[in-house]
Image (cartoon, rainbow, N blue to C red):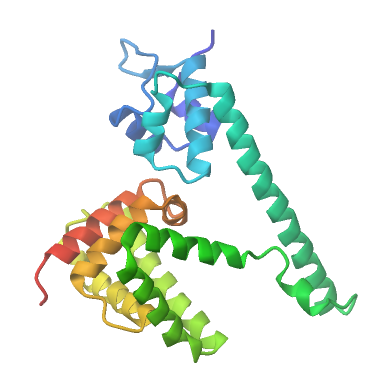
């Protein structure tokens, strides 16, 4: 049976060596054995486990939950794969609709067709926003509902350009933090203070009211709790969500300057 070193498995799977080392350290994916040369070696069973991990990660499941799911005594891998398939099939269906919308838009912009007004928004799911709001209220109570309504009222009089500009600021703040993550800066470093000041100010702007440090620290728990947030942040690098939320809590715990 073939075995693979960390570098070979990284090339085969597309997962970085750093990530495989991290999975080993947290006990999520241990090698089949370690050779006398101190190299880690992975066999067929480990390859299949890594496939399971990647399926779960694709669907936004946190690493801690993946470990629990994969190590459950009554785990049925075939049933899990079928569930993955159904969820991915639904994603493919929606992606195809979005592709058709993009193609129709390109055709209209090139003068090759005319879109009905309703076609402009095909594939976009307004129910997704409602889903997030329901989840937030369910997990954080009526105070969260009031906050959502206040934020909606704040943005009701704003233009689309205002929203795009605000989102661009948030993207810039997030990019700045991701750069520090990749540079290896510790999440509790005081060096990050000005960046989190800017990010918290952006959150206040999105809320339409002041975001206190305590509330900002609570956002970190929200980012950890909902898989879509982890998917969003980890697109900047495996482990960024955990680094970011740890840093947010460290920042929130420090007194206001």
Residue plotted at (46% across, 76% down): 167
Q: Residue furthest right?
A: 112
Numbered disc total: 0
In this view, the residue in front, 143 or 216, is 143
In this view, the residue in front, 138 or 27, is 138
Residue 115: % across, % down: 83, 76
Does residue 84 sit above or below 40 in this rendering?
below
- Res. 191 image quadrant: bottom left
Q: Residue furthest front?
A: 142
Does residue 221 sit above or below 193 in this rendering?
above
Q: Quadrant of the N terminus?
A: top right
- 118 to the left or right of 252: right
Residue plotted at (52% across, 44% down): 59
Q: Residue furthest top?
A: 1
Q: Is residue 240 visible?
A: no
Residue plotted at (52% across, 66% down): 130
Q: Is residue 220 visible?
A: yes
Residue 201: % across, % down: 29, 79
């Amino acid at each position: 049976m073939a075995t693979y070193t960390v570098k070979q498995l990284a090339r085969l799977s597309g997962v970085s060596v750093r990530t495989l080392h991290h999975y080993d350290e947290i006990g999520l994916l241990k090698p089949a054995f370690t050779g006398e040369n101190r190299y880690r070696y992975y066999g067929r069973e480990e390859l299949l486990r890594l496939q399971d991990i990647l399926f779960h990660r694709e669907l936004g499941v946190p690493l801690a939950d993946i470990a629990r799911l994969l190590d459950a005594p009554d785990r049925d891998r075939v049933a899990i794969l079928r569930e993955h398939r159904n969820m991915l099939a639904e994603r493919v269906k929606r992606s195809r609709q979005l592709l058709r919308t993009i193609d129709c838009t390109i055709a209209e912009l090139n003068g090759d067709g005319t879109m009905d007004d309703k076609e402009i928004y095909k594939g976009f799911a307004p129910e997704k926003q409602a889903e997030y709001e329901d989840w937030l209220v369910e997990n954080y109570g009526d105070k969260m509902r009031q906050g959502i309504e206040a934020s909606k009222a704040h943005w009701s009089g704003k233009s689309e350009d205002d929203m795009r500009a605000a989102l661009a600021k948030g993207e810039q703040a997030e990019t700045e933090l991701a750069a520090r993550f990749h540079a290896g800066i510790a999440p509790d470093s005081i060096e990050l203070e000005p960046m989190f000041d800017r990010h918290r100010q952006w959150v206040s702007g999105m809320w339409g009211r002041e975001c206190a440090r305590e509330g900002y620290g609570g956002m970190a728990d929200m980012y950890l709790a909902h898989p879509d947030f982890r998917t969003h942040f980890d697109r900047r690098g495996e482990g960024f969500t955990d680094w970011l939320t740890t840093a947010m809590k460290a920042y929130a715990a420090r007194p206001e300057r």
